[in-house]
Image (cartoon, rainbow, N blue to C red):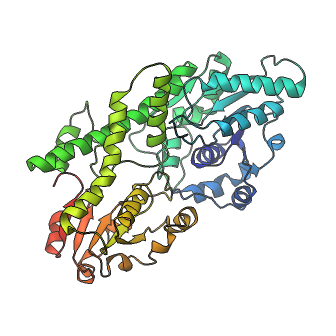
Amino acid sequence: MKVCVVGTGYVGLTTGVSLAFLGHDVTCVDLDQAKVDLLSGGRSPIYEPHMDALLADSAERMTFTTDYSAAVPGADVVFIAVQTPSLPDGNPDLQYLRSAAESVGQHIDGEFTVVINKSTVPIGSSNWVDSILRESFERTHERRSDGEFSVASNPEFLRQGAAIQDTLYPDRIVVGSDNPRSLDVLNRLYRTILNQTFTPPTYLPRPAELGAVPMVSTDLASAELIKYAANAFLALKISFANEIGQLAGKVGADISQVTRGIGLDTRIGPRFLQPGIGWGGSCFGKDTAALIATSAEYHHAMPIVTAAREVNQMQRRLVVDRLLDELRILKGRKIGLLGLAFKPNTDDMRDAPALDIARMLIDRGARIRLHDPVAAERFRREQPELAPYLAGEVEEIFDDSDAVVLVTEWSEYLDLDWGKFASLMRTPVVLDGRHCLDPERLVKLGYRYLAVTGR
């Protein structure tokens, strides 16, 4: 099939490259000429495991352009995967979605095109996009549209750091449409994923336990709400684990054992119960805010989701509180932060806990040093006011430090030779923000071990 993808961020690029790998002809449109040039040269503008290899494998079936007229006409499917950042009131900013829909509407020229909202958008946005497409199409072509296109919703459920794996081997594919013809097109588009009949890449083998992938076909509003509800529930699980972790610390319980004990209950499951600093990134914060804002439009409160956001924000403040409890005074203290990206295996720092923690420490007079094995260059570009605190080598984080905080659980940090760093520190205090270090081992090496939640 001929596929157009508008936007080459995490979602758009992963979608386009994966579909090209599966045999579709894909053209990606992005208004950023520098990004298009980079991708045309076979290089990814984002850090994502296996992305460069998949780009190379799909090169013959992929084109990158800034020109809608080179991508939209004749396309069977057009994905709109542009950014929808949060506004101050929690609602998503839809200016990029509107612009993309207007441009797509101007260039639709084929027998039948399915225009898919891949961006995370408020409930009802598909109807709004449909009206924009029709107005743009009719204004450009000077006639009414007569079944040339249909709008569908196909939300993404990608984990940054595992986005390609989640695309090729998903838990489910959700599609929403009020047009049976659109559902048929999407079924054909995803057939090899649904049936798992494609030859997997050698560097990302198919999970042995994976069978046929279910497709959830529903109406537009339900598909849009599924996306928000899924992310909100995952955010709730993390915040719940952290709230229980605070109680565990007060009563002397081991939160890691508590979450293991409840996670073995099949009704609950072990995933997203990791206690620590909490969630960040571009999805959970933005989507929970949007869900609350949408509910408010209908005079409906979301107290559980609201509480999850409050607990998550509190976890970042707890890092500073724990350091205050231990060191008593932060003014003049040197604090090292290990990790800047909001999670491992990505260089994304949107809503990264490290940013808030660094600023809170600076506000309290601490001297900070920052390190990340992958995200440092992006951090230097996007956070120029914090860039002077970057350390080139991980040893600088420990040298003469009063405490070191593990913020992002990169494997490079878990595998450090921790024994050789304790002697470099003024006071060998380690605050484990992700509950992933071995407390007994660190204590034997001479560290004072602290955790954000529990003990």
363 and 49: which one is in front? 363
In this view of the protein, which residue sits in the foreground, 335 or 416?
335
Q: Quadrant of residue 325?
A: bottom left
Relative placement, left or right, of 129 versus 50 is right
Residue 408 position in % (x across, y down): 37, 60
Image location of residue 196, percent across then percent down = 52, 37
Q: How many marks?
A: 0
Nearer to us in this view, 111 or 311: 311
- Percent position of residue 191, x then y: 59, 31
Q: Residue at x 59, y 47 (%)?
A: 14
The answer to which quarter of the image holds residue 301 is top left
Give the quadrant of the C terminus: bottom left
The correct choice, above or below, for 358 with respect to 254 in the image is below
Residue displayed at 49% across by 43% down = 158
Q: Is residue 70 above or below residue 211?
A: below
Q: Name the side, left or right, on which 338 lies relative to 161.
A: left
Nearest the viewer among 185 and 416 is 416
* Horizontal side of residue 276 vs 170, given as left or right: left
Any part of residue 57 in sight: yes
Which residue of the protein is positioned furthest toward the right in this rendering?
A: 142
**What is the x, y in percent for residue 314?**
31, 48
Is residue 344 in view? no
Q: Is residue 315 above or below residue 368?
A: above
- The quadrant in which the N terminus is found is top right
Residue occupying the point 58% across, 35% down: 192
414 is higher (above) or lower (below) than 17: below
Residue 443 found in image quarter: bottom left
